[in-house]
DNA sequence: CCTTGACTTCAAGTTGACTTGAAGTGGCAC
DNA sequence: GTGCCACTTCAAGTCAACTTGAAGTCAAGG
């Protein structure tokens, strides 16, 4: 597969693929002339990266979490730690979601008068979540998975 | 309250408060000499901003959650939409967490050979691709809430 | 009155994750 | 064989959300 093919199959722009390669997150199998060639393995790898991204890990972290070179030599302790971390995030987001859901149908005249909403506010304010939860996510609705 | 007091009570750095004011997210009640003074209202407002951030709204979006007069005017439809969004994120994170948990104890020679792990990967690949979920979130464990 | 230091402004820097642009190369359909 | 254009590199730009630094102001305590 050349870079365009990978882009087509995954929806990840070629520029991003080059960027990822530069960063060591993916590896091309070789070159055909100047052009990179990729094996099917890269698709798995990109799925893994997508997963890490979705979980809020930086590319750095993701790279460290899933094999340095492509071989799955993963620190199981780290995985467990990350899982716990994720678990806490999930609980926060769940509380958040429930609060939002309630607020969306709350009968109070203004959200500020709703005890539930105020409780949510308190939770948000009390450092519970210094965590962002999904900033940009602007990718044109490309082909996206055609594997 | 001066800016330091607000910072102390909310854990939001003074630089951030100035930044927020510049962006129109908060307003000072006046000045004492050069120094800004804030009313207690700003604390609610900052809680709301924290909420917005936690829910994954951009500052731009969060700013829009306030009516022009400064009264919070939260769009219930938007809340519902965000709640759904959050819900999808939660499901992904849950899959991720379960995958990590499993991977941490998986007996397969490599994670890639583990069917469970591969299933996780599949989930990640389908749709997750364009979604960020928690980029930086580095706030030193300051005083944080002393209201 | 004078020093102190917390405040002020404004510009520039930072970080992560990319994207964009200019300039060059070479595989392949014709 | 040759022209096209998808690919290449590399540097620079972008974006959000702040932070940092330099230089200046001024309320208050001694």
Image (cartoon, coloured by chain):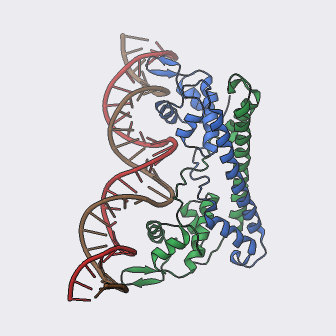
Chain colours: A blue, B green, C red, D brown
The C terminus of chain A sits in image quarter: top right
Residue A105, quarter of picture: bottom right
Q: Position of residue A10 (x, y in %)?
A: 62, 33
Classify residue B36 as left or right of residue B90.
left
Horizontally, residue B14 falls left or right of residue A50, namely left
- Residue sitting at 68 percent across and 39 percent down? A80
Q: Is residue B133 above or below residue B99?
A: below
Q: Is residue B67 something one can see in this rendering?
A: no
Residue toward you, A47 or B39: B39
Decide if residue A85 is on the left or right side of residue B22: right
Kindly identify the residue that appears in the image at 74 percent across and 75 percent down: A114
D18, B71: nearer the viewer = D18
- For this view, does A99 lie left or right of residue B44? right
Q: In which quarter of the view is residue A46 placed?
A: top right
Would you identify the image quadrant in which residue A55 lies?
A: top right
Query: Who's the residue at 73% across and 24% down the image?
Result: B108
Q: Give x and y (percent) for residue A145.
A: 66, 33
Residue in the picture at 62% in, 32% down: A75
- The mark tally for this picture is 0
Quadrant of the drawing holding the N terminus of chain A: top right
Residue A33 shows up from this direction: yes
Above or below, comparing residue B61 to residue A137 in the picture: below
Residue D8 picture location, percent across and down:
42, 26
Asked whether D5 or C3 is in front, the reply is C3
- Residue A29 is situated, as x and y percent measured from the top left of the image, at 53, 19
């Amino acid at each position: 597969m050349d870079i365009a093919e990978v882009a087509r199959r995954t929806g990840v722009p070629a520029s991003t693929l080059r960027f990822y390669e530069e960063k060591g997150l993916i590896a091309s199998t070789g070159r055909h002339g100047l052009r990179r060639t990729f094996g099917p393995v890269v698709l798995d790898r990109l799925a893994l990266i997508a997963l890490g991204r979705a979980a809020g890990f930086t590319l750095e972290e993701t790279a460290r979490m899933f094999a340095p070179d492509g071989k799955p030599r993963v620190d199981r302790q780290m995985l467990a730690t990350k899982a716990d971390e994720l678990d806490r995030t999930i609980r926060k987001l769940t509380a958040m979601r429930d609060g939002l859901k309630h607020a969306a149908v709350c009968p109070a005249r203004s959200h500020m008068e709703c005890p539930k909403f105020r409780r949510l506010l308190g939770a948000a304010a009390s450092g519970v979540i210094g965590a962002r939860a999904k900033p940009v996510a602007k990718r044109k609705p490309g082909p996206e998975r055609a594997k």
